[in-house]
Image (spheres, rainbow, N blue to C red):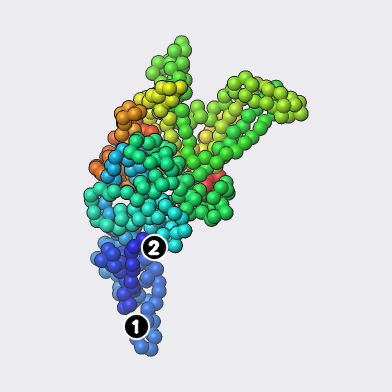
């Protein structure tokens, strides 16, 4: 059910009328269900099939072909007013608003605002925002003042009008959505089954191998996103380009190479690992560490770490990085890496395809920059620059200097080995 939309059935025909849209709602699937039901047409309760009462005409068929799959209209894309260095909040909200899992949760009445027991609840403010942006035909900007004030009240570090980091605000917002929509006894639980945990949280596996006895230690940690170090990738590209005979003096930076670097085995610093096996008895040993994704979430956020803080100085990496519209994540999972070790032939392996949904971009310097966001709405891309919204071309999106990438799971390949029970659960 769409938030704020009240529906009525026309008693004779069974047609569905939306009071807020002030129009009859037409959806091909609903029409099929309507036609299958019988309706009372006389005092003697004689029933007939609807298609017998109202035979389909050519006009009905034309409408069915061109009808939108969404039963109720939604408003045009709208931006957020910048209320004083609040662009970091606006871009994260846009990425959330154009996420189908979150959108379906709020428009479907997932958060009971009228019965909410939480003080300064951001979910209540976001519920209000969804109702305003998705059920009106306004085209001007929207001031998300309630979300801003409640963000300040929930975290004093956000209070004021200084620039904040969009990635940190995304993590803060998801945590607030979790604690205001989960069971009270699961606030600190890693097994929480709230919509936001199932949609955004994954699991990362760390495997440490002792260089002396080959003992393997495995740890698993929940993750909200993947943070890829661009600085490390730039160093690898620079070193490789200087090696004679590599034949590549200008290695391109792309998302796939960063993910490979992230999951490569690396040697730990001396003294960083104490092996607890009976052979080593807790002594410090040389070791290697390897990361892989144990559980993939349906909504995958990737942070490209462009900001660097060393001692008292800070800087931003302006390196260009290529990222795709469609991304196969299977090679970076525990099962994908196991398959790679077993055979170099990767043909016929399962695939886990993700589609790009939003791109957050930071423009300018670290201390005086500005955030903008590209979001996909059905088949169209839009650029959100505060309250200014313009249509964007796909090529423009792919040229952007991304800081945050949001991908939505699209397909699990023909093998279906990684299952997603529903739209808001983890891919194993």
Query: What residue appears at the point 68 percent right and 26 percent down from the top-left corner?
Result: 274
Assess whether mark 2 and mark 1 are in contact (beta carbons under 8 angstroms): no
Split into 4 quadrants, where in the image is the N terminus? bottom left
Query: What residue appears at the point 50 percent right and 27 percent down from the top-left corner?
Result: 261
Please, what secondary structure does the residue beneath circle 1 have? loop
Q: Is residue 10 visible?
A: yes
Q: Position of residue 356 (x, y in %)?
A: 39, 41
Q: Is residue 315 left or right of residue 198?
A: left
Query: What residue appears at the point 36 percent right and 88 percent down from the top-left corner?
Result: 43
Please say if 73 is above or below 292: below
Label 1 and label 2: CA atoms lie apart by 28 Å
- Give the number of the mark in front: 1 or 2: 2
Residue 1's disc is 2
Please say if 251 is above or below 338: above
Residue 411's disc is none
Q: Earlier in the sequence, mark 1 or mark 2?
A: 2
Identify the residue at the far bottom of this view: 44
Camera-nearest residue between 244 and 376: 376
List the residue tagged with mark 1.
41
Query: What residue appears at the point 72 percent right and 26 percent down from the top-left corner?
Result: 282
Split into 4 quadrants, where in the image is the C terminus? top right
Q: Position of residue 332 (x, y in %)?
A: 52, 34
Please say if 259 is above or below 141: above
Q: Is residue 46 left or right of residue 179?
A: left
Identify the residue at the far right of this view: 278
Please, what secondary structure does the residue beneath circle 2 have? loop
Camera-nearest residue between 51 and 297: 297
- Give residue 138's quadrant in the image: bottom left
Q: Position of residue 414 (x, y in %)?
A: 50, 45
């Amino acid at each position: 059910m769409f938030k704020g939309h009240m529906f009525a059935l026309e008693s004779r025909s069974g047609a569905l009328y939306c009071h807020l849209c002030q129009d009859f709602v037409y959806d091909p699937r609903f029409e099929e269900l309507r036609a299958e039901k019988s309706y009372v047409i006389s005092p003697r309760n004689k029933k007939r099939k609807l298609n017998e009462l109202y035979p389909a005409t050519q006009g009905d068929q034309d409408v069915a072909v061109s009808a939108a799959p969404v039963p109720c209209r939604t408003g045009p894309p709208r931006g957020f007013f910048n209320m004083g260095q609040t662009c970091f909040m606006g871009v994260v909200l846009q990425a959330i608003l154009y996420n189908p899992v979150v959108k379906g949760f709020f428009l479907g009445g997932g958060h009971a605002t009228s019965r909410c027991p939480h003080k300064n609840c951001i979910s209540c403010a976001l519920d209000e925002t969804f109702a305003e942006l998705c059920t009106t035909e306004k085209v001007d900007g929207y001031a998300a003042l309630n979300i801003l004030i409640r963000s300040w009240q929930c975290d004093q570090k956000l209070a004021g009008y200084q620039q904040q980091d969009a990635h940190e605000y995304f993590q803060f917002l998801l945590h607030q959505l979790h604690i205001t929509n989960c069971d009270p006894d699961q606030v600190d639980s890693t097994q929480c089954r709230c919509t936001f945990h199932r949609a955004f949280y994954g699991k990362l596996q760390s495997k440490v191998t002792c260089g002396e006895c080959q003992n393997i230690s495995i740890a698993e940690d929940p993750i909200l996103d993947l943070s890829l170090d661009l600085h490390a990738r730039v160093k690898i590209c620079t070193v490789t380009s200087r090696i004679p005979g590599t034949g590549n003096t200008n290695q391109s930076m792309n998302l796939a190479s960063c993910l490979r670097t992230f999951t490569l085995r690396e040697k730990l610093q001396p003294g960083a690992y104490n092996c607890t096996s009976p052979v080593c008895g807790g002594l410090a040993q040389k070791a290697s560490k390897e990361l892989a994704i144990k559980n993939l979430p349906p909504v995958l956020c990737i942070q490209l770490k462009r900001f660097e803080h060393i001692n008292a100085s800070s800087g931003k990496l302006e390196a260009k990085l290529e990222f795709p519209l469609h991304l196969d994540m299977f090679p970076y999972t525990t099962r994908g890496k196991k398959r790679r070790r077993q055979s170099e032939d990767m043909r016929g392996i399962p695939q886990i395809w993700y589609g790009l949904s939003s791109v957050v971009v930071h423009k300018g310097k670290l201390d005086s920059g500005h955030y903008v966001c590209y979001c996909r709405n059905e088949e169209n891309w839009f650029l959100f620059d505060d309250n200014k919204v313009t249509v964007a071309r796909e090529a423009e999106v792919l040229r952007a200097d991304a800081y945050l990438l949001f991908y939505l799971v699209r397909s699990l390949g023909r093998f279906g080995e990684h299952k997603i029970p529903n739209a808001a659960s983890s891919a194993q």
